[in-house]
Image: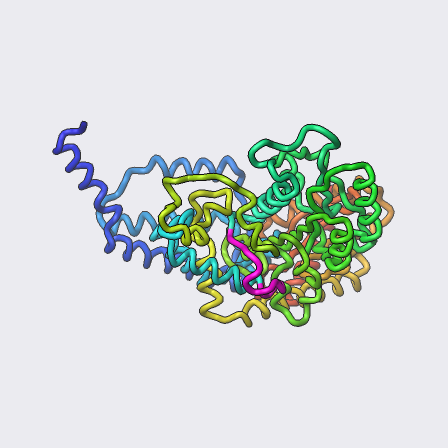
Amino acid sequence: MSPPDSLAAARARIAPAYDAGLFRDSGHAVSDALADHLAESLSGEGPVLNWNAPADNIAAATAALRGEPVGSNDEVADRVRGLVGEILKRGQNLHSPRYIGHQVPASVPIAGLFDAVGSVTNQPMAIYEMGPFASAAEEACVAALGEKLGFDAGSFAGFVTHGGSLANTTCLLTARNVLFKKCWEEGVPRSGPQPVLVAHGESHYCIARSAGLLGLGTRNVIKAELNDRRQIDPSALDETLTRLRAEGVPIVAVAAGACATPIGAFDDLNAVADVCEKHGVWMHVDAAHGGAAAFSPTHKHLLDGVERADSVIWDAHKMLFVPALCAFVFYKNREHRFEAFRQDAPYLFDPSDPGLAEHDSGMKTLECTKRAAALGLWGTWATFGEQLFTDLVDVTFALTRSLYEKLNAAADFEPLNDPQCNIVAFRYVPACLRDANDATLGRFQQDLRRDLVRSGRFYIVPTAKDGVPALRCTVMNPLTTEAHLDELLNELRTRGRALSERR
């Protein structure tokens, strides 16, 4: 045991880290730095991606860990300000209107303040008692979003988890456990044909990863045949399920997309539901990106039939524009909410007050400790109202339509999909490459993107169609304008010419 004087000295060293006044001073410093950063980013000034080689960033981060600690409040505030500045000057600036890349939004800044409340007060949510209002905010959002999807109030269930990959895995785990009643306790049956999962042919890689985690095996994921719009072909799906049933193959689920990642294709969910109901198969919908269309009178038809799915996921940290991570899981049948995990933990869950178990998220999610992930969405919704989400969807979808039309009208660009949402894939094909083979054309797209991204002028991402590399934009900043899109095309032309001359 440490002597009393050593403990006293330790407590004296700890005390400043918990000083409310120090937090206030440092908080003001951080708030000012972030406000300045947002003002610069939103204006479009400065680079989108502050490119540094990984080794350089690691060296900078390591050097900070080796710095001498500081003591006074002013010194701490200055140190915090400097460290935040280092993060910002070496980071990705999603709030730049020239960020048109991944499906990660320029989040509503105020949402981050509500997230910060959960972080500072540290209210993990395995049980209601540890995060009572965070749990309440989550349940309120679950109810409101589930009804937006068309589920009947009181009949469905849901919760928040850490990301769409974990959300998809949890839903498919539930489907597996419902199909095999003793699977949680005894494992996947080893006799008879191996169970399969049927998924959209371009589903997110986490679907195949889920199959591996669930003991099904990634080779037992059957890719559903797609039509020319890269949606599940319902007739082909019917034939696939008919064949599997005839062969006695257990079908864990059909995983549809709303929308699938590569080009944002929304499956015809009513048609998929008809086939699943015909064969008695669990229907799952990955609506991580497209769920937000439910807020838009103009676009909610894309989700027609989603309310017929047995499970749905929806990432608020995509098209609801809140910080990552905040992913929602929904079950049409409320009875399925505890099917994924069937374990006892008497040190957490109080048998003397069984009514609280309904509000203990640890019984429903893989996580025990879980951050108060819904506070950002709850606070944004309560502050601005749901019209904000409608506007965010409508503006970004419309802007993507405009980008598609610009690409379609340009002789040197080739759009690869007619966008249903805010995702469009394309290639830049200058005259000198019109007769190029696929390998040459694909490598050109990859080199062009690398040059563009590392310049800091724009941020877009790679994709491929029919195995040939291409470019992809997701409009995730509502402050991007038509002028920015014109600038993007011209920037690609300029860099493409320079790249061609170097070849």
Q: Who is closer to the viewer here, 328 or 475?
A: 328
Which of the 4 image quarters holds residue 266?
bottom right
Q: Which residues are magenta?
A: 147-160
Q: Position of residue 242 (x, y in %)?
A: 82, 45
- Is residue 157 found inside the magenta-colored segment of the image? yes
Is 387 placed left or right of 409 in the picture? left
State the residue lying farthest toward the right: 435
State the residue lying farthest toward the front: 352
Is 472 placed left or right of 143 in the picture? right
Is 44 placed left or right of 263 in the picture? left
Image point (81%, 37%), residue name: 247
Q: Position of residue 290 (x, y in %)?
A: 64, 58
Residue 45 visible, this angle: no
Image point (37%, 59%), residue name: 31
Q: Who is closer to the viewer here, 166 or 355?
A: 355
State the residue lying farthest toward the left: 5
Which of the 4 image quarters holds residue 314?
bottom right
Q: Who is closer to the viewer here, 130 or 478?
A: 130
Vertical arrangement, residue 251 with respect to residue 114, above or below = above
Q: Position of residue 25 (x, y in %)?
A: 28, 56
Q: Who is closer to the viewer here, 232 or 282?
A: 282
Vertical arrangement, residue 289 with respect to residue 208, above or below = below
Image point (55%, 57%), residue name: 316
